Amino acid sequence: MFRFPITLVKSIHICESWEGMVRITSLHGFPTDPEEFDRYYRSVHTPIVQRIPGVRNIRFGRVFQTVDGQPAPYYLVSDVYFDDVDALERALASPEMQEAIADVPNFATGGVTIMFCEYEDFSPIVGEPATLQRPRPGAPQPTIPPVSKH
């Protein structure tokens, strides 16, 4: 079942105050034929997505386990990154994006949920591990390391 109507991708409106990078996140349900899904996703769908104007990065991977040991709710998670909302809007209007969206029903036999998301990257803290404590009310707040947006 494909749950993302193609007519929805003509335009999006996300938090207008967001000025950072954005991504499209897709949560793919378990396909009827995982081997064929993997073959098609890598050899047909991904090359289509690679041609979308403004794509900064593409990342995907199969879900292999949940924290609590329950069956994974999704088979594959993918992210397609853009510099900002304007770049995503331009991409959504492109024939390449329309081709990619139209291609989804050709392989997503387990359904897919597609979301438009903000994102920020945080670098790991290197050195001595910090003791995590909740600050007392009125106490000075800890300094947060700078955010790297890429």
Image (cartoon, rainbow, N blue to C red):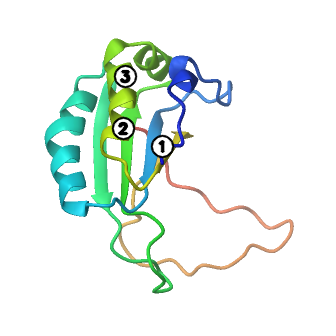
User: In the rendered image, which residue does mark 1 sit on?
Assistant: 2
Which residue does the image show at 31% across and 30% down from the upper left?
56
**In the rendered view, would you say 70 is above or below 21?**
below
**In the rendered view, would you say 118 is above or below 145?**
above
Q: CA distance from mark 3 to mark 2?
A: 11 Å
SS class, disc 2: helix
Which residue does the image show at 60% across and 78% down from the upper left?
132
The residue carrying pointer 1 sits among few (fewer than 14), some (14 to 19) or many (20 or more) residues within 10 Å by Cα, namely some
Q: CA distance from mark 2 to mark 1?
A: 8 Å
Q: Nearer the viewer, residue 75 or 50?
A: 75
User: In the rendered image, which residue does mark 2 sit on?
Assistant: 104
Q: Nearer the viewer, residue 102 or 55?
A: 102
Q: Is residue 148 visible?
A: no
Q: Earlier in the sequence, mark 2 or mark 1?
A: 1
Q: Is residue 127 visible?
A: yes
The reply to whether dot 1 and dot 3 touch (C-beta < 8 Å) is: no
User: In the rendered image, which residue does mark 3 sit on?
Assistant: 97
Numbered disc in front, either 1 or 3: 1
Q: CA distance from mark 1 to mark 3?
A: 16 Å
Residue 92 lies, in percent from the top left, at: 45, 19
